[in-house]
Amino acid sequence: MKKLKGALLIGQSGGPTSVINASALGVFKEAFKHSEITGIYALRHGIKGILNEEFYDIRQEDMAELDRLFYTPSSAIGSVRYKLKDFSVDDTDYLRLLTIFKKHDIRYFFYNGGNDSMDTCLKISRYLKSVNYECQVIGIPKTIDNDLYGIDHSPGFGSAAKYVATTLREVALDAQVYDTKQVVIAEVMGRNAGWLTAAAQLANFGNSKVDLIYLPEVAFDLDAFFDDIKKILQTKNSVVVAVSEGIKDAKTGKFIPELYTELATDAFGHASLGGCAAVLANKVKEKLGVKVRPLELSLLQRSAAHLQSLVDVTEALEVGRQAVIAALNGVSDKFVGIIRTSNNPYTVEYPLLDLEIVANQERKIPLEWILPNGQGLTKEFNEYCLPLIQGDNPAQLIDGLPRFAKLRKVLVKK
């Protein structure tokens, strides 16, 4: 089969992870091997980089710095939250995109992100086909939320889960220090799927314990929540609670902060979450009269490269590499999946799946894995999650601090 000859373009989209740059590195390193790829470009801030004709020439980068992407958190080339309308409704952005693709002879396009990003990938692929422009379009998965449909898990989740479990294990020990009654409420990211909050279950080892775990898969009852805490305080001085930012009130169906204030929305119409722990902490203090500490992990859980899982970052690199191989073999309209083939020993495969499977769908925790009354998760969750957090990936230290990648970020001439 004759391979397309032209430039490669990759963008990152949505919330970063501590391993997203490893996927970009996988794309870059594989692309360097193939003469059919005439240019290797990275979008500045996702889709907006196309519309603004701003992308970096990766061939101008120092290879040693590119290699450091394997240890570097956040989005090294910049991310974005930008919703493309359907081109049948408004083709303005698509016409601009086509102009840029033709000008720079883009024949391989990769978009690295979550559900909404895969929707963007699918829309671009369909449009390019409709105008008969040859370009292989492949989605590369990532999200700490672990809610991408059709795959076993998402790159980014394992490292974030390791951070949540480690941090809450440490917090649980700290909460036991004093002889006074205390409640710690930790808020973990997760809008509609509670995978990351469920990782708090892994903190329960020895003399550390997260007492209560509340996930968005199950409606949240405020009165039952107060009762659960009260019962535990009868037998011990400290209670550690993990809540998903996306838990909803059982009576109203609203997010907990939404009970007391109006929430802003993003470009995709999603409510901007955060503040759940603070709201619940105030209510617990009012009801029970004990000391309460709200703890919002916020950006820490997705940027904590010092707790990267070696399994996670290795898989993140591989999905990027597999995306390039697939595109060069003529594959388009797919995303690179991860399917577990064995748990002991842990092994995976990287099948190519239809973008329609994952675009705008979410995978939630099986209800049979969730124990009632906030009591945590079953052993099946532990068996699922533990292989994903194994191994360390320490960065080079300079003056005791990690040395992350410093890219030149040379823009391609317009």
Image (cartoon, rainbow, N blue to C red):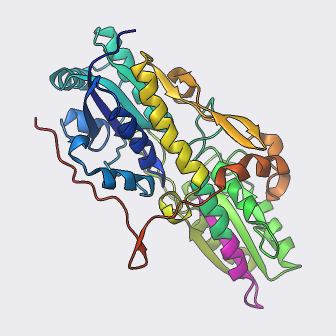
Side (left or right) of 33 relative to 95: right
The N terminus - image quarter: top left
Tell me: residue 271, above or below residue 362. Answer: below
| Residue located at (58% from left, 71% from top) | 295
Tell me: residue 295, above or below residue 155. Answer: below
Whether residue 281 can be seen here: yes
Q: Judge by depth and name the residue closer to the eye, 27 or 413.
A: 27
| Residue located at (66% from left, 75% from top) | 171
In the displayed orientation, state which residue is furthest to the right. 235
Question: What range is drawn magenta here?
Answer: 169-190
Residue 179 percent across, percent down from the top left:
78, 91
Whether residue 142 can be seen here: no
| Residue located at (39% from left, 42% from top) | 24
| Residue located at (60% from left, 43% from top) | 146
> Within the magenta stretch, is there residue 105?
no
Residue 365 percent across, percent down from the top left:
72, 42
Residue 35 percent across, percent down from the top left:
29, 25
Tell me: residue 122, above or below residue 156. Answer: above
Q: How many marks?
A: 0
Residue 87 percent across, percent down from the top left:
32, 18
